[in-house]
Amino acid sequence: MSAVQHQIAELIATGNDGRMYATEPEKLRRLVESELAREAGLAQPELRQVGVGLIALGDHARARRVLAAALERAAKPGQSVATLINLGDAHRYAGDLAGAEPNYTLAIETAKADCPRMLHFAMQHYGKHLIDARKPKLAAEVLQEVLKTRRKLGDQALIASTQEALNLARAAVGKRTV
């Protein structure tokens, strides 16, 4: 991760609703604009991170444009999967659930075929999408599968993130986990 990518990532947090937000919006905006000024020279991971910054800033239309360009530059399956997830988020955060779904499903398909280590990330974001799409039962099923995978991995932060999303899905159908 480049120094600027790291700076952008440090200015983004996840709220109780599971969505990204800028912790210092003006500082993040300056960094993102500085990077966009040299967009043509950015490597794919840097361009994707700029798109994530735009999502956190709430500039979803620009995020979709930048992430579409980052997707075109993806040279590895993992880059494609990560970018498709972010592109889905850019649509979902803007309320465009119909536009989000194909990005998540393509991320899942690509991960299954070419990058299985990223499948749980794609499925986690798809599960969150299903909550927003008012399909909480399906969301809970998807997130339960993600939770099984993440428990096998043993990463407590990932487990907690999935548990929170699963709680949201179950609450939407009238059940909570313990």
Image (spheres, helix red, strand yellow):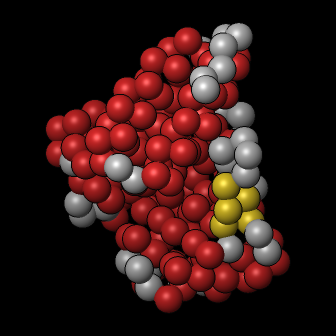
Q: Is residue 100 visible?
A: no
Q: Please tell me which residue is depicted at 55% across the width and 12% down the height of the picture.
A: 137
From this view, report whether residue 95 is shown above or below residue 131: below
Nearest the camera: 163 or 101? Answer: 163
Image side of residue 169 versus residue 71, left or right: right
Residue 101 left/right relative to 91: left
Could you say which quadrant of the image residue 122 lies in? top left
Give x and y (percent) for residue 102. Answer: 45, 31
Q: Position of residue 61 (x, y in %)?
A: 67, 52
78 up-or-down from 147: above or below: below
Between 16 and 12, the residue placed more toward the observer is 16
Above/below status of 138 relative to 132: above
Quadrant (top left, top right, bottom left, bottom right) of the C terminus = top right
Q: Residue at x 52, y 20 (%)?
A: 140
Q: How many circles with numbers are drawn on the protein? A: 0
Name the spot of residue 93 as percent of width and height, x first. Answer: 68, 42
Is 169 placed left or right of 83 in the picture? right
Residue 133 percent location from the top left of the image: 63, 21
- The residue drawn where x is 72% and y is 41% is 17
